[in-house]
Amino acid sequence: MIRPSMAIKKRIFFLLVFFTLSLTGLIVRISWLQVYDGEKLQKEAIKQQVRDSMINSRRGSIFDRNGKPLAVSASVETVSVAPNEIKKAGNAGEIAGKLSQILNMTYEDVYKKITKESDYEIIKRKIDKNQADEIRQYRLKGIYLEEDSKRYYPYGNFAAHILGAVGVDNQGLFGIEAKYDKYLKGLPGRVISAADAAGTEMPYQYERYVDPEDGANVVLTIDETIQHFAERHLETALMENKVANGGVAIVMDPQTGDILAMAVKPDFDLNNPLEIQDEKRKKELEKLSGKDFTDRYRVELQKMWRNKAIVDSYEPGSTFKIITAAAALEENAVQLDDLFNCIGYAVVAGQRINCWRYYRPHGIQTFVQAVQNSCNPAFIEVAGKIGPEVFYRYVKAFGFLERTGIDFDGEMAGLFHKPAAFNQLELATASFGQGFQVTPLQMISAISAVVNDGYLLKPRLVKQLTDKEGNVIKNFDPEVVRQVISKETSAVLREILESVVSEGTGKNAYIKGYRVAGKTGTSEKLPRGQKNYIASFVGFAPADAPKAVVLVILDEPKGDDYFGGVVAAPVAGKILDDTLNYLGVEPRFTKEELLMMDVTIPEVRNLDVEQAQQKIKEINLAYKVEGSGNTVTDQTPKPGTKLPEKSTIILYTEDSKPTASVVVPDVLKKSVLDANKILNDASLNLRIVGSGTVTGRSGEVNAALSVSQDPPAGTVVVPGTPVNVEFRHTEVD
């Protein structure tokens, strides 16, 4: 037997040690990979072997209170690619060319994405059906079309600040879209498919599909029709009065706290919410670049999206006198026939505080007349009778020291004096709504409490959540916060505030056939002396059983007038008029209003002149005969036209020819009587719009002056044509 040499033994020993150490190292490495890196490697292996594509869920719709869609999701598709498959096929240039042309993208951008070292890349989201079908027809390897949805707002800029918008990922950015995002977005689905080492998708049997779960629908308290009324009249007011800083109009149901409309102007297109609408700011942004552009753009975007009705605060001015009056009456600090003497100003703590009509003081007046006149010195005296502690208690009770609790992001609480700093001077200015700030939402909520028998309600913007079949998932019921004043005090205030419209500073909110009540307000913005004013009016109707409360705020009107009673009251009146008619509230006309009602002109052609005259007189119209014949051969206006009673119909007999045309005269800045005479002399008829028929305490109907006419002066019309002339009272707070 041959024994191995020492050299061979050493070699064997070294080999044994080497293999032992190698095996030990391998065991240690495997153990390390299994124990410490196992989870990480497992995830990377799954990622390499599986393609996981997300399918966006269908976002729930947003409806108005009557089920009209305000925000919906349309079916679109997302284009994605598997760069490894394209690399294997070797046709990246061809694919980049076709996709860039179909998707309106640059060739370079597409080519860069499809040649990345990646298993999955999104080329473009939310393409329409035509683009998707065109891509499908090419049957491109490595190109995938995934089901997606795109948010669409049928009315564009309608209720923009309420609805809000979504980003490219279907995530709510602001408004209801953001606040209720967790309900609206639903749960995404997935397509999980196997892939080989090169990233190429395996056959269909290795695919798993998880259905997306649709989001819930949000039903608002907003009424689409009333919202249109508010937006239309507010938009017109901004243009007519050259309002510099936008405006707000809110309509609330005082019995439930439901927001029926919330218009904020200027607004923007919800289908393009990332584009700055203001041309001046757009030009300023174009001059910036880099971080300066990004920072400024974000600021401007937030300004544009800002809901002034909920987030911004303002000095309420004389509309707050309603709260002062409510506190005084509830505390029996004043009686309706208490007398106050206005000498044009009051002196408090050595400071002179003027009445708005300091140039012609109101003189001796009752408390009711002081409300009608919106007299500052009288309210200073009333607040003095209440005292700072009690006054402060009512400010808190009406909700001005806290947020209303509306389910909407960004609500502010307003700014009021601290109790320790609420001295006699601050009490005096607070009595007529200056020296502190409230939000429009706080204001309309408080006034609703004044007129609904005294109950402060939490404002409600969302009514319920429903599923895709319309089944109710969750209800948001009306919520009473507290009772602030008694039913009796509320009833008295409704009557007083009705007299403000019929006899006081609120005449321009008058509506024929409806008992309208309300209060005007004008406040000068800080810093004082810059002549920047906020004009406002809060009104409700019918006065004895309110169905709707309207608040209108115009921020910095720059037209001929800036008083709330002149520029804001007519807007509130028009919104109330449209709203009450829409809600089916029956008008109740006074005797004076019945005399101003429109009547339909009858057919009198081919009748004897006497028969025609009798037929016209029966419906309280006047007539004028042209010619000396016995038969009426023509008439103006034509049958079916509507005119106010006592308007004149021109009758033409067989021996006369109708006048072809007349020129409409200028009747702007005229009284009712003067405008009527001028138009009658021109063979035209006057149709009064606005507050021209409201009588003052003197009984004069010509206290209002005309502010607009349609058709305008210089227009050529046929004789007898009615000219719509809007009248407003100009000496109002």
Image (cartoon, helix red, strand yellow):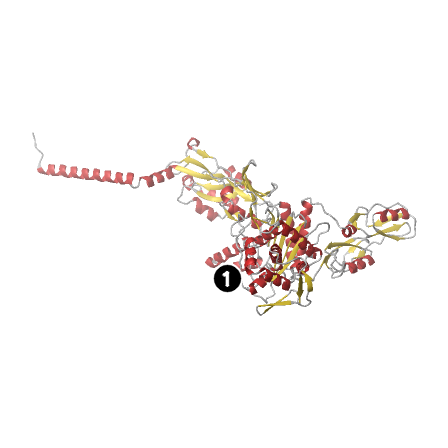
Q: Callout 1: few (<14), some (14-19), or many (20+) C-alpha neighbours within 10 Å?
A: few
Up/down of 39 relative to 542, above or below:
above
x then y, percent, for residue 132:
52, 40
Q: Nearer the viewer, residue 190 or 134?
A: 190
Residue sitting at x 39%, y 44%: 117
Up/down of 354 relative to 608, above or below:
below
Number of marks present in the image shown:
1
State which quarter of the image contains the N terminus.
top left
Q: Secondary structure at mark 1?
A: helix
Q: Nearer the viewer, residue 33 or 397?
A: 397
Occupied quadrant, residue 89: top left
Q: Nearer the viewer, residue 113 or 562?
A: 562
Q: Is residue 511 left or right of residue 247?
A: right
Residue sitting at x 92%, y 50%: 629
For the residue marked with disc 1, what is the amino acid? Answer: Ala
Instruction: Answer whether residue 51 is visible to the viewer in this image.
Output: yes
Instruction: Answer whether residue 418 is visible to the viewer in this image.
Output: no
Q: Is residue 486 left or right of residue 730?
A: left
Up/down of 123 relative to 281, above or below:
above
x then y, percent, for residue 170:
50, 44
Name the residue beneath numbered marker 1.
420
x then y, percent, for residue 113:
44, 46
x then y, percent, for residue 183:
50, 42
